Amino acid sequence: MAADGNVRFKPVEESCSSEDETDKVTPFIAKSKSKRGFKYEKLIKNEIDDNLRSKIEEIGRKNGKPVNHFLKRGIFFSHRDMEKILDSYEKGESFYLYTGRGPSTKSMHIGHLIPFMFTRWLQEAFDVPLVIQMSDDEKYFSEDLQNGEEPVSIETIREQTRENVKDIIALGFDVNKTFIFSNFEYMCPEYYKNICRVQRLIKLSRMKIVFDFDDNGNIGKINFPAIQAAPCFSSSFPHIFHGKRDVPCLVPCAIDQDCYFDLMREIAIKLDCKKPALIHSKFVPSLVGGVRYKMSASKPGSILLTDTNEEIETKKYDNDEIQSDDLKSELIKILKTIIGEIRQRRKQVTDEMVKRFMTPRPLNYKYKHGSNEIL
Amino acid sequence: MAADGNVRFKPVEESCSSEDETDKVTPFIAKSKSKRGFKYEKLIKNEIDDNLRSKIEEIGRKNGKPVNHFLKRGIFFSHRDMEKILDSYEKGESFYLYTGRGPSTKSMHIGHLIPFMFTRWLQEAFDVPLVIQMSDDEKYFSEDLQNGEEPVSIETIREQTRENVKDIIALGFDVNKTFIFSNFEYMCPEYYKNICRVQRLIKLSRMKIVFDFDDNGNIGKINFPAIQAAPCFSSSFPHIFHGKRDVPCLVPCAIDQDCYFDLMREIAIKLDCKKPALIHSKFVPSLVGGVRYKMSASKPGSILLTDTNEEIETKKYDNDEIQSDDLKSELIKILKTIIGEIRQRRKQVTDEMVKRFMTPRPLNYKYKHGSNEIL
């Protein structure tokens, strides 16, 4: 609803704000007025059909990975160019995975887990390298402050980032195939050049349409989408891809993040790079308000990775769709197991491990493309 | 003159566009309609009076440097906080110099020489380190293309930058006290963090007022002033200042560049850094149009560093102020000497020397501040 009381309709192609009578979905807000929840059929880019799903599962099986339940259950429901990724993979050409997290004082919740758990499955199923961006600079530019709250310092964010990296490591990624980087700590010439390449091709007017930015924002915030976009280009990581600009990139993410990468796809050809492929998940509903909201760490209604067994049991499931007590008990049992395992692994993550994951270094994977081969 | 035919007046404090009935001065354009040329009395920040001039000259004399003619003749006519720099210098606290150049295919002209020659004098008179920014990223973001001209690639700018660095080295800077850096090649975590610190404190609306940006510009261009500003903070150069954030910075520049640093002075206190001090020069007038225009490499009427003796002789001096043939002959003689010397030194500048100047490394200077001392 716009300030003048009129409902605004924005075509998804132009703005990442998908908004109609009942739903609003942007990278900054996601809510639905409908009891049935988000109309994913409107958010979908390309459907993951049975054919595509089977193809992904088949590759997984070859590498000894059982079928992924997020894929089977349609939690990952949408994509861009997944067929291209699979076709070239089957011809022996590898790709890399790129996902990320904005560091926060708040613990990760099970909504955050979905893209990471699926990314891990993809990494193991395809045996490919993975880069994870910790967008500490975005956090720094954030103007979403509570009353009287001071803007956070770079030094404070640095500490939060390290704790968040430990959470991610606890999800079980392979250190030999995974590079976790903070923008503040990793910034280097090759990465910066790609950021500039993106910046030059996007007008401020376009940025305002896509992200609903206005003139009151700080210039860092307005610039940030270029920084989220640049790791889609393999030359941002010379220690991994040795200067290659055309290693294909696959981004697993929730559907509300699509706009960053869609913008990137728009300009990739001008940069002599491949368009990043995407695979999109639905949201995990909040415990409060059910399917009308996505789970959010800054609001009540989340199952956190730091929750104890007792807390998991007492959190109120007021989701209308789950009326069976048996189902609720089953869900509590599963959550206790998943979170319990992560809790155990989290305890074992040392500063030394953080350092290893975050050190720019070659990763252990094979990449074949055209006449070149990197082993 | 605005599109509606009305003259716009903008206060210098708010916009760097100083514009009235006859003069317009911004970092992007400088012209006067008056036969008497730019009204420097309107552009001045703080006058360099006899007292201040004597103080600077006295320090120079102690270090064996003869009086500088740019200072004596009022070519450097304006400043911000020069007294503070001198006061703390006399107490034994050093500072550093920061100036820069936007790389260009065009040869440097004698207008470019003024800040560099004066910077060299300051470096020798005060025995202080100097950082020189090659703003290759700004060049890349430039949208000031001729008809049908293709935007330039990063690789092409890299070559131009190296040639430009050779021009600067030929002016005689001391490699032990001078770090020349390209933004593309130097970008690193500490520099990037300072850029982000600046970005967070400047709203887009402010940037538009100060630099006359509009929504049609690319986002890199809008972001660039933060990149020109960040080297004012000594922590951008950990290899020189070992993490110190409060080494004072003095920027010698032409008066049209003041706005970048004025913005920086506005936010320095919030960043727990010192306000950069400035010393401003007048423009060298163009040979065509005389004092109404500054000399510009992209327009006729320049004496270039690549000019031969014959070219210097035949370039037409249509400056009304110089009517005496004797004066013109004297000027030609002086220019031949200066440019001849630079031409000789330029021939001796090797790739190896470029590499030495551009390698991040400690510089040879003493810095004393409070209880700390860096030798």
Image (cartoon, coloured by chain):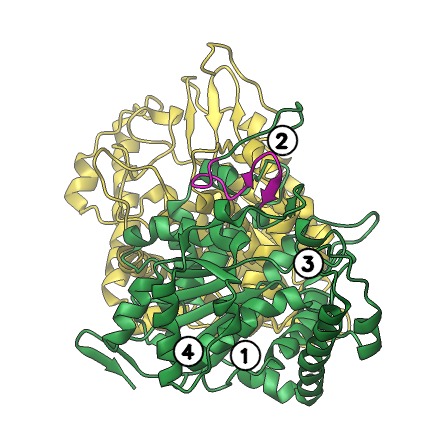
Chain colours: A green, B yellow
Vertical position of residue A328 compared to residue A319: above or below = below
The residue singled out by tag 3 in the image is A295
The residue singled out by tag 1 in the image is A358
Prevailing secondary structure class for the magenta stretch in the rendered image? loop
Point 47% across, 41% down: residue:
A12
* Element on which disc 3 rests: loop
The magenta segment: A11-25
Q: Do labels 3 and 2 touch, CB within 8 Å?
A: no
The residue singled out by tag 4 in the image is A129
Front disc: 1 or 4: 4
Mark 3: give few (<14), some (14-19) or many (20+) Cα within 10 Å: many
Q: Work out whether residue A258 or residue B121 is closer to the camera in this orientation and state it.
A: A258
CA gap between label 1 and label 4 equals 14 Å
Q: Earlier in the sequence, mark 1 or mark 4?
A: 4
Q: Earlier in the sequence, mark 1 or mark 3?
A: 3
Q: Could you tell me residue A208's position as x and y percent?
A: 52, 38
Point 76% across, 55% down: residue:
A288
* Element on which disc 2 rests: loop
Residue kind at label 2, given as amino acid type: Glu
Q: Could you tell me residue A24's position as x and y percent?
A: 60, 42
Q: Do labels 1 and 4 touch, CB within 8 Å?
A: no
Q: Which mark is residue B14?
A: 2
